[in-house]
Amino acid sequence: LLPWLDGMMDADEAYFKEHGEPLFSSHMIDLSEEEVDWNIETTAKYLKRAAPMKQWLEMEIGITGGEEDGVNNEDVDNNSLYTQPEDIPHIYTTLKKISPYFSIAAGFGNVHGVYKPGNVKLHPELLEKHQKYVKDQESLKEDKPVFLVFHGGSGSSKKEYLDAISYGVVKVNLDTDLQYAYLTGIRDYVLNKKDYIAAQVGNPDGEDKPNKKYFDPRVWVREGEKTMSARVAEALVDFNTAGQI
């Protein structure tokens, strides 16, 4: 992970030197399976590089369950899915001294993927406690001083989204739902046009009829884009962000 991030930030710094802005507006660093102090110290080192460019850095504390990109956390201890309250002030005070441009993906039972209702127990109310803890520890005026991130958002209820957002979540990850939405458009197209894509020539309209216009990837890929776009629009309504910039 870190060599990849090093390479991207090298490119950011080179681009910033020439254009006055980084190549990437933000990066996400996930060291959540590492020891907490090392996670925070390492994140701080990268934030120091990002700070002169006013570049955003998202870090993760607390493991997200489930499976994603070949990393399987389906069997981790449930307690690992919940960020400890004392970790958030530690992160906040360490990073705030460096730059205000950071967010924290704190675990509150999050799981990658979609599972049978009842199998995933989210507790977004823990985020409110994190905010209050930081406010009290730092004697701050703001009720929600920490920018929080909701990992593993797919399959969550609208209430869970809105509760989390009300506690200071500024970003929701929605990968699995969008993957499935993309599939549905392509799946339905293939099922509806199966007699027109079984061969390059020959379909219900005639044995000599060409089928290129049906199996052209630009046609069926577009169907996936349509259904995925519709799912994004639905999510924006759920997150109370539709029509906003």
Image: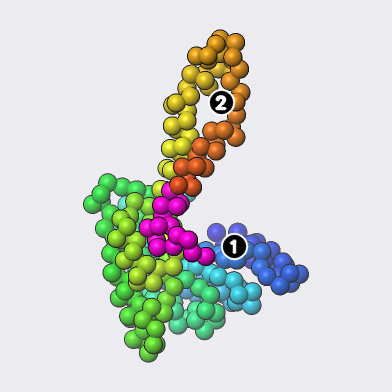
Residue found at the far bottom of this picture: 139
Does residue 243 belong to the magenta stretch?
yes
Q: Residue at x 74, y 69 (%)?
A: 19
Q: Give amino acid for label 2.
A: Tyr
Residue found at the far top of this picture: 207
Q: Write down the residue under mark 2.
A: 214
Residue found at the far left of this picture: 118
- Mark 2, Cα crowd under 10 Å, few <14 / some 14-19 / many 20+, is some
- For the residue pair 41 and 148, the one nearer the viewer reads as 148
Query: Is 147 left or right of 44, judged from the image as shown?
Result: left
Query: Is 20 left or right of 30, judged from the image as shown?
Result: right
Q: Write down the residue under mark 1.
A: 5
Examine the rendered structure and indicate whether residue 1 appears above or below residue 101.
Answer: above
Q: Which mark is residue 63?
A: none
Quarter of the figure with residue 201: top right
| Image coordinates for residue 240, horizontal then vertical, percent | 40, 63
Helix, strand, or loop for circle 2?
helix
Q: Disc 1 or 2, which lies upstream in sequence?
A: 1
Residue 41 visible in the current orientation: yes
Helix, strand, or loop for circle 1?
helix
Q: Give amino acid for label 1.
A: Leu
Examine the rendered structure and indicate whether residue 82 appears above or below residue 73.
Answer: below
Q: What's drawn in magenta, residue-wise?
A: 231-245
| Image coordinates for residue 39, horizontal then vertical, percent | 47, 70
- Mark 1, Cα crowd under 10 Å, few <14 / some 14-19 / many 20+, is some
Q: Residue at x 43, y 32 (%)?
A: 188
